[in-house]
Amino acid sequence: MKDSQGSPAPPSGGADPGLTTGALARRLGVSPTTLRSWDRRYGLGPALRSEGRHRRWAPGDVAMLETMCRLTAAGLPPAEAARAARGPAAPPLAAGPDPAGPASASASPGATGSGESVPLPVPGSRSRAAGPLPLGDVRQECRGLARAAVRLDAAAVDEQLTAAVEGYGLTVAWEEVMVPTLHAVGRKWASSGDRYVEVEHLLSWHVSTALRRCTRPPAAGTALDTGPLVLACVPGEEHTLPLEALSAALCQQGLPARMFGAAVPAEALIAAVRRLGPSAVVLWSQSRSTASVPLARQVAATAWGVKGARRRPVVMLGGSGWTGRGPRALYRPTGLRDALLALTAAAAPPLG
């Protein structure tokens, strides 16, 4: 029986008919073709089907497919992921080959290294499922993280970020997993008319959460003889993730740091420098419009202490906003590793 729109009517009796294939595909961030392929090849179909072979996915079916997506995003081959998603008591797979053939699947623009097909946006399509991100030659972990972010799968994003930090250490996880994936999301957003902004927000939030889990101030009594390290975004600059990564890495090395975050007013920054007497100040600017050369010079000239023993901070300029703009006398690190080495040297107590 069909309704006035020509769609199958839900069964009577008030029972939840479940999600349609299209609705489930949008929820998971994959194409309806992928769901049908997983049904044919791996037996990951709905437990119940309505009349006319229309698929209706119950909550248990949705949970099974969410597990499938999470495992393939982590790099598990689809056949193994399907066995795990179906549970330990699942019967052996007996599905035949994909009618499209293996060559067609691997050549598809939406195919990924794990065999999962992720759709590219189709003009005029009603589905808003996101397409693959332009990652290029990067770690496999980046591809899994990108697929989880495109699906808006918060649990998988968090799990993979945690595994990257625990498996490779914070610096490698930041430079080789988090940054390439963030850049890919940014490029996709810029070229897709804001269609991927929700993906970037979700990924940025979880990257920030993973970094802050690593941010533990040094224990009391372990502070160095020199002042703390000050990290701040210049006025008008809202991008804090690189500074959050630096703050977490400094904490892991036992170096005292004060993280002031986004868009710190110039007067507040100068006041904090005078109060703290830091050994070094990192000023972050991601765009040329926020890179203030006068502010950098003012911070570098700020002094404290008694006459005859007055001190000034080492000032480091981070971010692409300073390219071709910052005073030559101020140091510009090339990345997280370089910044850590320079700040460790700046925080070392003076000899004698």
Image (cartoon, rainbow, N blue to C red):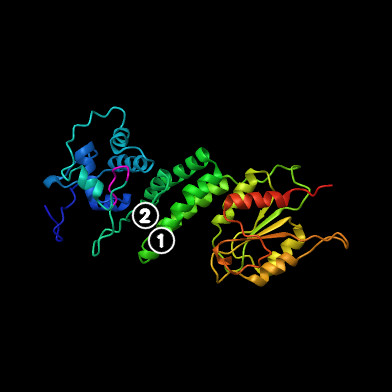
- State the residue in front, 278 or 69: 278
- Residue 100 in sight here: yes
- State the residue in front, 258 or 335: 335
Left or right of 153 in this view: 270: right
- Assess whether mark 2 and mark 1 are in contact (beta carbons under 8 angstroms): yes
Q: Is residue 11 above or below residue 261?
A: above
Residue at left 28%, top 56%?
120
Residue at left 81%, top 47%?
351
Per the image, label 2 sits on a secondary structure element best described as loop
Q: Position of residue 64 (x, y in %)?
A: 31, 39
| Magenta highlight on residue 117 | yes
* Badge 2 density bin: few <14, some 14–19, many ≥20, Cα 10 Å: many
Q: Which residues are magenta?
A: 113-118
| Magenta highlight on residue 57 | no
- State the residue in front, 177 or 210: 177
Per the image, label 1 sits on a secondary structure element best described as helix
Can you identify the residue that label 2 sits on? 133
Q: So how many labels did they put on this image? A: 2
Please name the amino acid that badge 2 sits on: Leu
Q: Which badge, 1 or 2, comes first in the chain's sequence?
A: 2
Please name the amino acid that badge 1 sits on: Arg
Residue at left 25%, top 46%?
106
Main SS of the magenta segment? loop
Can you identify the residue that label 1 sits on? 187
Q: Position of residue 261 (x, y in %)?
A: 61, 59
Q: Position of residue 44 (x, y in %)?
A: 24, 39
